[in-house]
Amino acid sequence: MEPTPKGPGVIIPVGPNLSQTVTAAGCLPARRMIWAATPVGLNVWTGPFLPGSIPDPPADVARLPVGPAAVGPNGNWAVLAAAGTESAWVCDLTQIKNGRSVRLVPGVDQVRASDFRLAPGSPKVWQDFPAHKIHVGSISRVGPLSDPRSFYTVSNEPGSTGRQTDTLVLWKVEPDGKAVRGGAWPLPDSLAFAPHPDGKRMLVGGTLDRRAGFVDLATGKEIGPAFSHPGVVTAVAVDPGGRWVATGGQEGVVRVWSATDAAAVGREFFHAGRVNGLAFGAGPSAGVLATASSDGTARFYDVETGLPLGPALRHTGAVLTVGFEPRGGIVATGSRDGSLTIWEAPRITNP
């Protein structure tokens, strides 16, 4: 099996300083959308993915620091958590236009958007943006589920004993854009989360027991095999076809497992720093695992053979996130250096 060649990455400068660290990113070609979350806000572009066609977002805007953020798999909504508060906003992205920065503004209970394409020196013109506020504990994670109308949050909330504990909360976005809270399960000492494509399970990586396991989203109980790891688990991923799971750790090790047999360690890969993100490809990139690390690189691997696919994708800062677009073929990486990079993913083909 030989990988097809991949082209160079398209680098999109999101910001010039650490306040614009790209903490999450993705691309949705079906909607011609690229997005990048930073501590300042959520930047959204629509249009062709061409070098030089994507402008820099404004850096000097009124803002409320943004915590975790995510965009739904269909690109119709986003969730933004306000850092240091117990609130988050569910934003309607169906009316988004090219070059928008969706940000939280101090003193308001709504989200506002600004346009990137402004003449130098012109005032920033804000407009109200369709959004609904939800109240939760202090959010540490947020992400979409397999149902395009659903997402999860991980927040610090009172547990059954009254003490604060990390809690996995499930949400559904209604047709009017409001988010309705569903099940909530305490999951203390957890750092990494990845939904299973069947929509019924969540792979959760722990900090104390150095392993990952599936949690039943209907009951909150652990089900199926547990996957041990040599160190603290900092990233997990589930193959879109449900065949494999991957765990990554603080020590830089990545392990790939059969999703149904925890004794079958298929492959082991290595980084020189903490593993911050893992993602499996789909469609033309099925069988490809992408990894992101604090060593300043992202890498592609053939899961079946364990071989690297091309050279390391080098960045000038720690790579914090990596994600395939849902149909495969394109990968987005986000770095602490303030850049979002779009790459053509390798394809696994039969000789």
Image (spheres, grey):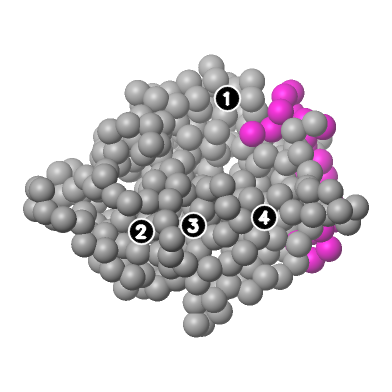
Q: Is residue 70 left or right of residue 186?
A: left
Specify the farthest residue to the front: 107
Q: Mark 2 near mark 1, Cβ–Cβ under 8 Å?
A: no
Image quarter hosting the C terminus: top left
Taking the spot 43% from the left edge, 64% from the top edge, the residue there is 108
Q: Is residue 235 left or right of residue 213?
A: left
Which residue type does callout 1 highlight?
Arg
Q: Callout 3: helix, strand or loop?
A: strand
Which residue type does callout 3 highlight?
Leu
Marks 2 and 1, the one that precedes in the sequence: 2
Disc 2 crowd, CA 10 A, few/some/many (<14, 14-19, 20+): many
Which residue type does callout 2 highlight?
Val
Q: Callout 2: helix, strand or loop?
A: strand
Q: Which residue is mark 3?
A: 80
Q: Which residue is mark 1?
A: 274
Q: Which residue is mark 2?
A: 102
Q: Mark 2 near mark 3, Cβ–Cβ under 8 Å?
A: yes
Residue 23: x %, y % from top left: 46, 41
